[in-house]
Amino acid sequence: MLESMGLPLPAETLIISSALYCAATHRLDIAWVTVAAVGGAIMGDNFGYLIGNIYGHRLLERHGAKVGLNERRLLLGRYLFRRHGGKVVFFGRFIAILRVFVALLAGANRMPWHTFLFFNALGGIGWAGGYALVTYYLGNEVLKLSGPVGIALGGIAVLVIGGSFLFLKKNEVRLTEEATRAAELEQKGKSRP
C-alpha cells in the first residue's frame, strides 16, 4: 500500500517472499496473502490518487518548470491522461518505477476517478494477485526465473519508456495543439448554461 502511495518500497519482494513462505511452511494461507496484496495495492493507489489530486497539480504548476514541465507540457500531460490514462494506470502497475508515481500523476492530471478506479483495480489484481499466486504455485522455480525475466522485462520497460519519450518529443507540438483544442472545447462546453 505504501509503495502504491508514492514511497519507493520493495512491494514485489514482499509479495514474492510472503508467497514463498506460504508455499514452504503452509503457516499462512495464500488466499489471505493474495487478498492483502491486492487490497493494499488498490487502496494505496487510491490514496496516491487523492494526494495527487489535492496537492499534485499545484505543485506541478508551481515547481514543474524546474524540471522542464512548463504550462504547455502540463496541458499535454492532462490531455494524455484523459486519452490514454487507463492504459498508463494498468500497465504502469507492472513497471517498478512507474508503479510508484502513476497514481500521483493520474490525480495531478485530473484523470476521472471512476476510470482510474477501474484500471487501477484491474492492474492491482493482475499484478499483486498474479505475483502472489504464480510464486506460490511455482515455488522456488520463481527465484530461478525472476532474474532473467526481471532483466528482460526491465529491458522492455526501458525500450517502451524510451520509445514513448522519443515519440512525445517528436510529436510534442502536434499533441500540445490537440490538447489545447480539446481544452478549449471542454471550456466552451462548461461555459454553456
Image (tube, rainbow, N blue to C red):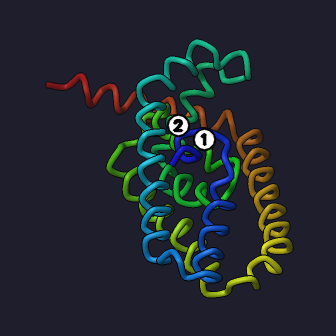
Q: From where the camera sits, is residue 178 visible? A: no
**Disc 1, disc 2: CB below 8 Å?**
yes
Q: Nearer the viewer, residue 158 or 137?
A: 137
Q: Nearer the viewer, residue 183 or 129?
A: 129
User: Residue 108: percent from the left, percent from the top?
Assistant: 49, 31
Expressed as whole percent of the image width and height from the top left, the position of residue 193 reads: 13, 25
Residue 104 tag number: 2
Element under label 1? helix
Q: Amino acid at mark 1?
A: Phe
Q: Which mark is residue 49?
A: none
**Would you name the residue on which mark 1 appears?**
101
Quarter location, residue 174: top right
The percent position of residue 176, horizontal first and vertical second, equals: 59, 33
Q: Answer with left or right where residue 135 lies relative to residue 150.
A: left
Q: Is residue 25 above or below residue 78?
A: below
The type of residue carrying mark 2 is: Leu
Q: Is residue 4 visible?
A: yes
Q: Residue at x 49, y 40 (%)?
A: 106
Residue at image point 44% right, 54% down: 42
Q: Secondary structure at mark 2?
A: helix
Q: Nearer the viewer, residue 65 or 188?
A: 65
Q: Position of residue 114 (x, y in %)?
A: 32, 50
